[in-house]
Image: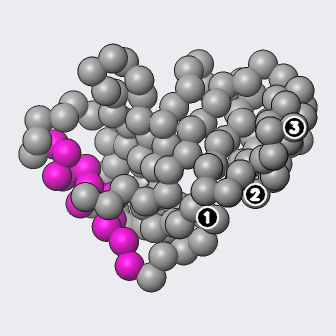
């Protein structure tokens, strides 16, 4: 099962302070909009998202259709197929992608320890 690009989405208290901290660790801005309280930062192959006031906990994030530079992949497994495979394995969905649609969609699952996993397809 190919889940796409991986990142950790961090719930931060002050996005400017967090941005400066991660820049000190060698991360550079890859995308986002600090005026909207979200940024995507990258250091080599490691991608993190900083999100202020958008969700309560840190989230593991996968993006089908993207590589680690947020560039479109030629071929990828559609999120609805990934969701179907997970449901067949008995994994409970906290939120589901509408299987009657195409294109952008997302679903959320939770691991056995309560860590949320967002699978978010942008195209």
Q: Disc 3 marks which residue? A: 24
Pointer 1 residue: 70
Outermost residue toward the bottom? 74
Task: Decide which of tag 3 and tag 2 comes sooner along the chain.
Answer: 3
Label 3 or label 2, whichever lies nearer to me, is 3
Could you say which quadrant of the image residue 31 lies in?
A: bottom right
Dot 3: what SS? helix
Which region of the structure is painted magenta? 75-87
> Quick one: label 2 or label 1, which is nearer the N terminus?
2
The structure residue drawn at horizontal position 61% and vertical position 56%, both measured from the top left corner, is 45
Cα distance in 3D space between marks 2 and 1: 8 Å
Please name the colour scheme applied to the rendered image. one colour
Q: Position of residue 64 (x, y in %)?
A: 43, 61
- Asked if disc 1 and disc 3 are in contact, CB closer than 8 Å, the reply is no
Query: What number is the disc on residue 30?
Result: 2
Residue 117 inside the magenta-drawn segment: no
Q: Tags 2 and 1 in contact by the CB under 8 Å rule? A: yes
Is 18 situated above or below 119? above
Q: Is residue 89 left or right of residue 121?
A: left
Disc 1/disc 3 C-alpha distance (Å): 22 Å
Q: Nearer the viewer, residue 81 or 1?
A: 1
Q: Residues within 10 Å of mark 3 (few under 14, many from 20)?
A: few
Q: Which residue corresponds to the image point at 66% horizontal and 25% vertical from the top-left?
A: 11
Q: Is residue 36 visible?
A: no
Residue 58: percent from the left, percent from the top?
56, 26
Q: Is residue 80 magenta?
A: yes
Residue 10: which quarter of the image? top right
| Category of crowding for the residue at label 2, using alpha-carbon neighbours closer than 10 angstroms: few (below 14), some (14–19), many (at least 20) | some
């Amino acid at each position: 099962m190919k889940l796409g690009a991986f990142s950790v989405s961090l719930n931060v208290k002050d996005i400017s302070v967090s941005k400066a901290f991660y820049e000190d660790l060698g991360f550079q801005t890859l995308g986002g909009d600090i005026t909207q309280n979200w940024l995507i930062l990258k250091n080599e192959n490691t991608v993190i998202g900083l999100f202020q006031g958008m969700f309560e906990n840190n989230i593991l994030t996968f993006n089908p259709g993207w590589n680690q530079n947020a560039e479109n992949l030629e071929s990828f497994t559609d999120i609805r197929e990934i969701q179907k495979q997970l449901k067949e394995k008995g994994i409970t969905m906290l939120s589901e992608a509408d299987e009657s649609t195409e294109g952008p969609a997302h679903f959320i699952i939770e691991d056995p320890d309560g860590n949320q996993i967002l699978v978010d397809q942008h195209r």
